[in-house]
Image (spheres, helix red, strand yellow):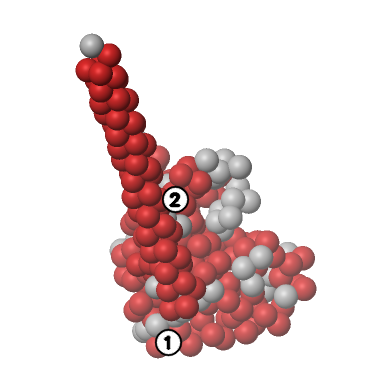
Amino acid sequence: MAKPFFSTLVRYYNNYAINTLGAVMGRQGSVEKKNEREEDINKRLASQYERFLKDNDLGAFLKLGLGPSKAVPLLTKPEKSLPKPRLVDKDAVRLVASAYSRSNLVPHPDIVETLTESVATLNRGLKIAKG
Amino acid sequence: MDLFSGMDEALKKKVVLAWAEMKENEKMHFINQVTLALIVLGNDANGKAIISSVLERLVNDGSKDLSDFGLYIGDNFAMKEAIVHAEKIKRASVIIDGYRIKNALPSEPHKDLQI
């Protein structure tokens, strides 16, 4: 009676040991695979970064996640509030541009701005006068 | 800052009324002449004050077209800025005269004849 009991016990422990060992090895295998994947990713990122530094490769730069996709959220939260864009009188811009184009004048941008604002003021005054 | 920010409201109204009657072609000539004046006089407060003064003389003289600008810039000015920048004004007048001749603009202002 003792012999079957003992052999059953041994078989039980054997199975337990095999299962445990298998589970541990399996887990270790998955950890190793994960480590390998991470190493691969790190290697790829490193090579892309090197390419970016060496050739100024924009594709590699974007793949690294350093490009506009990461820069945009920073722009949405500026430290100081940005000035509101001024309303532009398209008619004034067109008129000033066509005047310069006709006379081949290329004035300083500050002068272009002064004239555009002045024409916009006149147009605005005209609209107010017309009601 | 535009050219009219320091201008009297009544005067500004006269300028706007003249602007309302002008054709697109005349508006372009006005823009070009004022640009030439700003290039010579400078795009600062003094330059803008002189241009504002020229416009004042233009509308007060009865001209109905702002493209007559070049006909009034050569006149003698009493204002302080104009006396200081007399040489520049003379130069601007010569350059704008050249522009007016090149574009066959009239040598007399657009205003009603007084009989």
The quarter holding residue A68 reads bottom left
Q: Give, as a three-letter code, the residue at label 1.
A: Ile
Quarter of the C terminus of chain B within the rendering: bottom left
Nearer to us in this view, B59 or B112: B59
Quarter of the N terminus of chain B within the rendering: bottom right
Is any atom of residue A50 visible in this view? yes
Q: Which residue is mark 1?
A: B101
Q: Total label count?
A: 2
* Numbered tag placed on residue A105 in the rendering: none
Q: Give x and y (percent) for residue B61.
A: 53, 62
Point 54% across, 74% down: residue: A108
* Numbered tag placed on residue A70 in the rendering: 2
Name the chain under label 2: A
In the rendered image, the vertical position of residue A49 relative to residue A82, given as above or below: below
Q: Give, as a three-letter code, the residue at label 2.
A: Lys
Q: Secondary structure at mark 2?
A: helix
Nearer to us in this view, B108 or A18: A18
Q: Residues within 10 Å of mark 1 (few under 14, many from 20)?
A: few
Left or right relative to A127: residue B39: right
In the rendered image, the vertical position of residue B102 relative to residue A30, given as above or below: below
Say which of marks 1 and 2 sits in front.
2
